[in-house]
């Protein structure tokens, strides 16, 4: 998911992603993701002194149909 990984040909194997990166991937602000983590809407794992969101959760969000979208409108 990172441009650096794609450019070097390496696979990004991180199991959790930092909040700012999750926000960028989802197209929302980092504050929105932090609030979702704090309210329990998004799971998190502690990594040092920061909270990160599990990669599997982010991928599941991206794979899920958008709320209210017609089946043919959902990007695959």
Image (cartoon, rainbow, N blue to C red):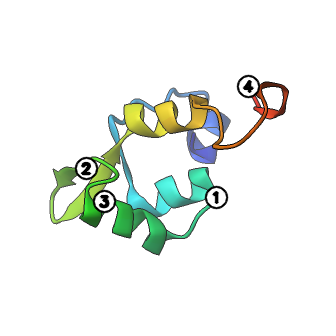
Is 48 situated left or right of 39 in this image? left
Q: CA distance from mark 4 to mark 2?
A: 26 Å
Quarter-of-image position of residue 34: bottom left
What residue appears at the point 61 percent right and 27 percent down from the top-left corner? 9
Residue designated by label 4: 76
| Contact (Cβ within 8 Å) of mark 1 with mark 3 | no
Which residue occupies 48% across, 53% down?
22
- For the residues labelled 2 and 3, the Cα–Cα distance comes to 6 Å
Q: How many angstroms separate mark 3 from mark 4 (CA)?
A: 26 Å
User: Mark 1: which secondary structure?
Assistant: loop
- Counting residues from the start of the chain, the first of labels 1 and 3 encountered is 1
**Residues at marks 1 and 3, CA–CA distance in whole angstroms:** 16 Å
64 above or below 32? above
Looking at the rendered image, the quarter that the N terminus falls into is top right
The spot of residue 59 in percent (x, y) is 50, 33
Q: Name the outermost residue toward the bottom.
A: 31
Tell me, yes or no, whether the two marked residues, 2 and 1, touch with CB atoms within 8 Å: no
Q: Do labels 4 and 1 touch, CB within 8 Å?
A: no
Q: Which comes before the other along the chain, label 2 or label 3?
A: 3
Please say if 59 is above or below 41: above
Which residue: 57% across, 44% down? 2
The residue where tag 3 is placed is: 37
Establish if 57 lies above or below 46. Answer: above
x and y percent of residue 60 in the render? 48, 31
The residue tagged 2 is: 44
């Amino acid at each position: 998911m990172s441009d650096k990984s794609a450019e070097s040909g390496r696979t990004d194997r991180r199991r959790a992603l930092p909040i700012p990166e999750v926000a960028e991937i989802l197209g929302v602000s980092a504050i929105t993701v932090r609030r979702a983590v704090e309210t329990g809407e998004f799971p998190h794992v502690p990594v040092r002194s920061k909270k990160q969101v599990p990669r599997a959760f982010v991928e599941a969000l991206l794979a899920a149909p958008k709320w209210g979208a017609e089946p043919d409108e959902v990007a695959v």
